[in-house]
Image: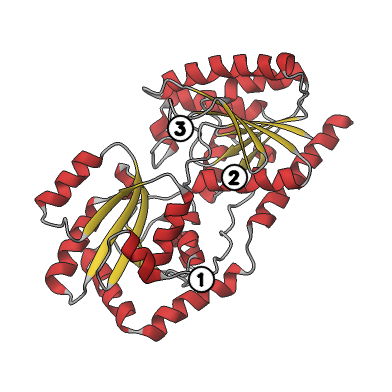
Amino acid sequence: MEVLVLTPTFYPRVWWAEESMTQLYSWLVEKWVNVHVFTPKVIANSQLWRDSFMGVNIFRFVSIEYNKYSKFISYNIFGFIFLLYFLLKMKKRVDLIHVQYLFPMGLLWVLFSKILRVPIVFSEHHYGTWSDISSYTENGNLINKICAFIFKKSDITVSTWFTQNEFLEYLSDGSGTSKIKEIKLWAPEKKEKTNVDKLLLRKKYNLSTEFVFVSIWRLVKRKKFEKLIELSKHLKKNCNIDFTILILWEGGERSYLEEQIKEEWQQGNIVLLWSKIWKEKEELLFLSDLFLFTSEFEWSWLVYTEANAFWLPVIAFENEAVNSIYKNNHWWIVVKRDIKLMGDEIEKILSDKGLYEDKIKQWYTLLEEYSWNKYSENYFDLFHLILKKYEK
């Protein structure tokens, strides 16, 4: 099977949507599926236009990303050139097209799927556009109309979370819900820590405090970074804890954030580390004691479960992703959006070793039921089912 993938983001980015793609496509390669990914360069001048990762063939282009519309134009121009190269120069056939996010790459590839007479499957992670928004209404009417057209012309669109189900049902206008397939993101595999020297890792990153709390972000408004500054001030003033809050981040606001930290006299308690490298993220999770998260909105539980996979209890503010799971399972410590409440829970769990271990055990009992293999198998079965329909 030859699968052609179009995605606006891919490895070496190491955030959660990208992780799900890496897990899926590398798993498909192991099942003798040839996967070809077409994606923008992450770092324009430092990556080959063609490379591979875990058996996945990757083709990269330099995109113009001033706004949604420049993305739409550049992605589709380069997409057309890439398809000609793929079919004519490489003389490859295409059995199935898989597109991540409806917009900005979907419109052209729906057309190509009809011309080539091959099925097209979309995966929807975040309201069609891969933008930092908390509701599909923020897309604007025009983009939502384009997304609705693409959705209705697709063979099927995979939803990864209940918020995306709502978005796709809105696009379908009640007439195309049979084209929605839910495949929820699964939890990361649990990590073995038998050979991890936490103290040695802390020396590597110049961390000397008794406790290290970690948070991993794309630095965007909905993550509410400023709440961690407030938390640091609160802990420093009211709690007898020797701590560092470590933030692994990606984004373009470093100077602004450093200035905010400096103004609040929190330089010694908050450390910003910029990285897109998985090995560094793994090390920082292993060396930490707690995972803190103050986001006001998340589209999936994956950000939290990854922390649990590294043996970290999670303390988080309420949001839709947390609340949807927390109703029936108390794996994480969830607090209302109040700094004092979060500070109280941090003190409580650090002073109670039994509670700390219990939170890890609760999660690990459930983790056995989840795996990326199951997630990938669901896609594999879906692809084969759609291909059989086309054979008929």
The Cα atoms of the two marked residues, 3 and 2, are separated by 15 Å
The amino acid on which the numbered mark 2 sits, given as a three-letter code, is Thr
Residue 22 disc label: 2
Q: Is residue 168 visible?
A: yes
| Quadrant hosting residue 191 | bottom right
List x then y, in percent, for residue 42: 45, 32
**3 vs 1, front mark:** 1
Residue 62 disc label: none
Residue under the point 41% across and 27% down: 140
List x then y, in percent, for residue 63: 46, 22
Query: For this rendering, which residue is in front, 258 or 277?
Result: 277
Residue under the point 48% across and 65% down: 310
Left or right of 105, for residue 348: left
List x then y, in percent, for residue 188: 56, 59
- Could you tell which of marks 3 and 1 lies nearer the N-terminus? 3
Question: Is 294 above or below relative to 157?
Answer: below
The residue indicated by pointer 3 is 42
The residue indicated by pointer 1 is 195
